[in-house]
Amino acid sequence: MIFLGENSKVASTVKNFISSHRIPHAMLVEGENNTANLDLALYIATAAVCSGSPSPCGVCKDCHLAEVGSHPDITRVSTLDGKKFLSVSQIRELRADAFVKAHQATHRVFIIEDAHRMNEQAQNALLKVLEEPPQSVVFILLVPSKTMLLDTIISRCVLLSLLESKSDDNKYVEMADEFINLLLSGSEYEMLKLLNSLEKSRADAEDFFTTLSACAAERLKKGSSHARVLDRLFDDTKYYLDLLATNINMPLLISLAVSRSKGLLDR
Ligand SMILES: [Zn+2]
């Protein structure tokens, strides 16, 4: 029996769509560890074909077949021996295969290992079936990083990222530092432009303001000449986080944060 890895965010996403019987037609698993990517794909595949409950039950005939790698409704596609790339003809074959009804389970699952080894032509061939997937077919693409695939493919898939979120944290540290610099130079429009990308996601905004508060505290600790401003900014970030928790309209929150931050220099 395969268990879900330790990445709790992905694990809960996956458990959610399995328990609600809404397994997406196409998923993209990205992660540096091939084995972990494959384990996650096999877990989803097993859940998709399992005839027990809750799936994957680990005891039914389908789970057993999936575990030993011989379930007829789970197909793994990878580069052929000695080949560097997945060929267009492999993808065409997969596409034709996807229209064949499931042998015994409710779903058919295709796991495309090393999906980044598809050239553009192969990816476009796959795109056709991702755009109009046959009923009850699930595609799971495995890649070290989604950036190795065409945007058109990425946009058709639910992303399951096993990549460390370290790079994301860094992004916000950089962004928070830039925000403080813009604040100290009084560049209201630039601040607004910088925060614009946060409008779409409450979670991102929360990460940003949390990081901003840490950055302000860090600068205070180092003894900045702008201690008064940073001190107020630090208090303000708490206020923004409180507002975020109240379902405030995002563009409103961002313009409020920018105008208050601009005002910190005058206060
Ligand atoms: Zn089962």
Image (spheres, grey):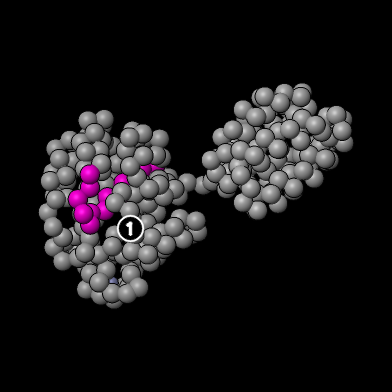
Residue type (three-letter) at the residue carrying disc 1: Ile
Location of residue 222 (image quadrant): top right
Question: Where is residue 51 drawn, in percent x and y?
Answer: 25, 72
Question: Where is residue 123 drawn, in percent x and y?
Answer: 25, 35
Q: Is residue 148 magenta?
A: no
Question: Where is residue 58 drawn, in percent x and y?
Answer: 31, 73
Q: How many marks are shown on the rendered structure? A: 1
- The residue nearer to you, when weighing 258 against 207, is 258
Residue at the spot 33% in from the left edge and 64% down from the top edge = 21
Residue at the spot 76% in from the left edge and 24% down from the top edge = 186
For residue 190, side relative to residue 57 (left or right) = right
Query: Label 1 belongs to which residue?
Result: 23
Residue at the spot 40% in from the left edge and 47% down from the top edge = 159
Q: Taking the image as drawn, is residue 148 in sight?
A: yes
Question: Where is residue 189 drawn, in percent x and y?
Answer: 67, 24
In the image, residue 189 above or below residue 257: above
**Which quadrant of the render holds ligand 1?**
bottom left
Q: Which residues are magenta?
A: 132-144
In the image, residue 21 above or below residue 125: below
In what quadrant of the picture does the N terminus appear? bottom left
- The residue nearer to you, when weighing 180 against 169, is 180
**Dot 1 surroundings within 10 Å: few (below 14), some, or many (20 or more)?**
many
In what quadrant of the picture does the C terminus appear? top right
